[in-house]
Image: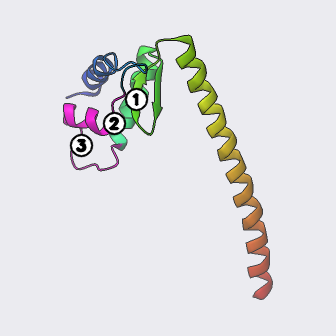
Amino acid sequence: MDENKLIEEIKEILLKHKCSEKRITSGEIARRLNIDPDDQTTLRTRNLIRKTMEETGLPIAANSKGYCIITSEDEYKNYINNLRARRKGIKERMSLVEENWKKYDEKNNNKK
């Protein structure tokens, strides 16, 4: 199936999965559309879901339980707040790794 057709099929699947009702995993989408059956990470499917969002303008949310369409202001606000919290956590981890790397590198380079 060509990419445009896959995007249209993904759109139709996601429209049946509202955040208030239930989510669908990338693995389930991949299985339904027979996208790269050997890809355990569903990378191609996740990339196609992102393209679906970009090309269709659908407000698609995602978390560890799967993907869904945002259909209310509360869902929208909750999802944006979740993304902000994740961004903050990533920044904190990044700073910690940078700090630890400098200490580690300094310690190990001084031993040489």
Disc 1 target residue: 67
Residue 26 is labelled as: 2
Q: Residue at x 40, y 36 (%)?
A: 65
Q: Position of residue 60 (x, y in %)?
A: 45, 22
Residue 36 is labelled as: 3
The alpha-carbon separation of the residues under discs 1 and 3 comes to 19 Å
Quadrant of image for the N terminus: top left
Amino acid tagged 2: Ser
2 or 3: tag closer to the N-terminus: 2
Q: How many residues crowd around disc 2 within 10 Å: few (fewer than 14), some, or many (20 or more)?
A: many
Stretch of the chain drawn in magenta: 23-42
Q: Position of residue 20 (x, y in %)?
A: 43, 19
Q: Residue at x 46, y 31 (%)?
A: 62
Quarter of the image for residue 101 reads bottom right
102 drawn magenta: no
Amino acid tagged 3: Asp
1 or 3: tag closer to the N-terminus: 3
Q: How many residues crowd around disc 1 within 10 Å: few (fewer than 14), some, or many (20 or more)?
A: many
Q: Choose between 57 and 65: the one closer to the eye.
A: 65
Q: Position of 34 compared to 67: left or right?
A: left
What kind of colouring is applied to the model shown? rainbow
Q: How many residues crowd around disc 3 within 10 Å: few (fewer than 14), some, or many (20 or more)?
A: some
**Of discs 1 and 3, which sits in the foreground?**
1
Above or below — where is 73 with respect to 31?
Answer: above
